[in-house]
Amino acid sequence: MTAWIQTSLLTELSELIASRRDAMLALTRKLVEAESPSGDVEGSRFVVKLLIEAAAEIPMLKSAERVTSPDYGEHLRRSYFEQSASARSQTLILGHTDTVHPRGTILERPWRSEGERIFGPGIFDMKANCALALEAIRARAALGGAHPTNGDAVTLLLTCDEEDGSATGRALVEEEARRAARVLVLEPSAPGGRAKTGRKGTGAWTLRAHGLAAHAGLDPEKGASAILEIARQIERLHALNDFSRGTTINVGVVRGGTTSNVIAAEAEAEIDVRYTTAAEAARLTAVLANLRPIDDRVQLTMEGAINRPPLERSAAVVELFNEARRIAHALGFELGEAQVGGASDGNFAASLCPAVLDGLGIEGDGAHARHEHIITTHIPARGAMIAALLSNSSAE
């Protein structure tokens, strides 16, 4: 368990966060009602403003930066505690402020509570977890003076374009991951509040077929159908699925042709690829690059690439998960783990920092869905666990 954390101190952390539960939920409500879909510059900036105001009284702030992201808004980066001189000294808390819900959704699905469940667009993924990150840092700072952590730094990075591919956020994630000893990703937890010790990588390609047009009634034999070729290639592509290895290939969009009485000269298919290891990514990339036409009168072109590496369940990931699980047990709850198909900014971090633990956010359900909600029951314990992990010095 983290060296400076003993059971009595875990109790203090939990009590500190419990005492601020109402304040945290009040901030969460402000964040949810301040809609910030990806690409909404005004919404993004306002959410960052709310977070900065909420963090104003947290001590030990060393630097703060609002990083402009053209056409998206602002990323938020804040560093706390003293920076150690060692190369990998910081703990990086990673999250995002953008959501998938278009502006106006809050009018259709306003904030509402049903017992321990609170509903609202973007609350689970991941406005509540932005607020929780601040509370974990606040609690860590409150106890840090009496129980020093060898000067280990904590950096909070909240990007504003994660849901749209992290076009500008990726560089910031990679910059911070290079100097991190560990990365705590406060993305939504898996069902049952489980942490995510593995995420599939993702790739996106477009396959285009260029055939020969002909009249479907008068000269069909002179045509070479691009649509037929794409259909045949889809069979090939779907045959590459290997669920036992975690490899999935899906053709989700197909376009082609002009009218029904013309042999189609052009067609294309959009391909989604998921995989669990870097080696599998390399294999699939080679396979896709070397597709050959079944009808040799048709030309094929393939465009695309890997866009997120996998977060693999490595020894370093397992070690960090086990530390979190021991802390959780001391706090009175069991932390499970899951490997999932969806990707996050944690994938980018994993390519540069060996110890990445994802899905540490508040328990809930319905990310991106109408029933999106959090469960407030275990917020104090969850926050205390994260606060306890904000030290790089570990011991049994």
Image (cartoon, rainbow, N blue to C red):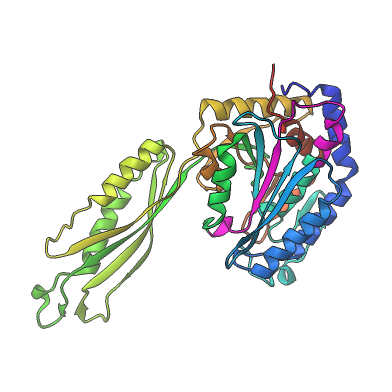
Looking at the figure, which quarter contains the C terminus? Answer: top right
Considering every residue shown, the one lying at the far top of the view is 396
- Asked if the stretch drawn in magenta spans residue 308, the answer is no
Looking at the figure, which quarter contains the N terminus? Answer: top right
Left or right: residue 144 versus residue 205 is right
- Asked if the stretch drawn in magenta spans residue 153, the answer is yes
In the foreground, 395 or 213? 395
Q: Residue at x 57, y 57 (%)?
A: 163
Percent across and percent down for residue 335 are 68, 32
**Residue stretch in magenta:** 138-164
In the foreground, 248 or 387? 387
| Viewer can see residue 330 | yes
Which of the 4 image quarters holds residue 221?
A: bottom left
Q: How many marks?
A: 0
Q: Residue at x 58, y 68 (%)?
A: 71
Percent across and percent down for residue 157 are 66, 48
Percent across and percent down for residue 60 are 81, 40
Which of the 4 image quarters holds residue 190?
A: top right
| Viewer can see residue 112 | no
In the foreground, 233 or 28? 28
Percent across and percent down for residue 385 are 75, 33
Left or right: residue 385 versus residue 250 is right
